[in-house]
Image (spheres, rainbow, N blue to C red):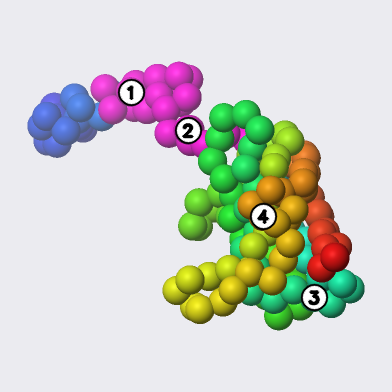
Amino acid sequence: MHPLSSLGGRARALPAALGMALLCLAAGCGESDRPPLGTVTGTVTLDGVPLAEALVLFTPEGPGRTAIGTTDASGGYRLAYLRDIVGANLGPHAVRITTADDEAGRREILPPRYHRQSELVAVVEPGDNVIDFALQSE
């Protein structure tokens, strides 16, 4: 009696499962549909002072998802591609920074050139990117 014959149908399914696994690896199964990302961190200041609780948005110039981060008390931010995935699409981005938050009752303190009519741009490269923004109120 063959040593695997006591396993019945599972013994015959094992080679097929291994074959499918190898086929998937060769064909790229399990690879993420996510595009290549670069991590982006930095600091936002307004008139030389760290800007806390500002929303930082990087929108790629080509197709892709907007990456979002919020500044902490020291003005530091880290972009997230999705809630639990850090980073942003590679390439050039239009950048918007806003302090307005209707839910929290915060009004906009930044000039429109940083959010609604943003003049800010950034390029995300592979790997780690540190992109700081020194904003001016006037």
Q: Is residue 7 above or below residue 12?
A: below
Image location (x, y in percent) of residue 90? 69, 36
Q: Circle 2 sits on which residue?
A: 33
Within 10 Å of disc 3 (Cα), the crowding (few <14, some 14-19, many 20+) is some
> On the picture, is 47 further left or further right than 123?
right
Residue range in magenta is 16-36
Disc nearer the start of the sequence (2/3)? 2
Instruction: Point out the frontmost of discs 2 and 1.
Output: 2
Q: Circle 3 sits on which residue?
A: 50
| Mark 2: secondary structure | loop
Within 10 Å of disc 2 (Cα), the crowding (few <14, some 14-19, many 20+) is few
Please state which of residues 30 and 89 is positioned toward the viewer in this rendering. 89
| Mark 3: secondary structure | strand
- Residue for point 11% across, 29% down: 9
From the image, which quarter does the C terminus lie in?
bottom right
| Mark 4: secondary structure | loop
| Amino acid at dot 4 | His
Image location (x, y in percent) of residue 122? 78, 44
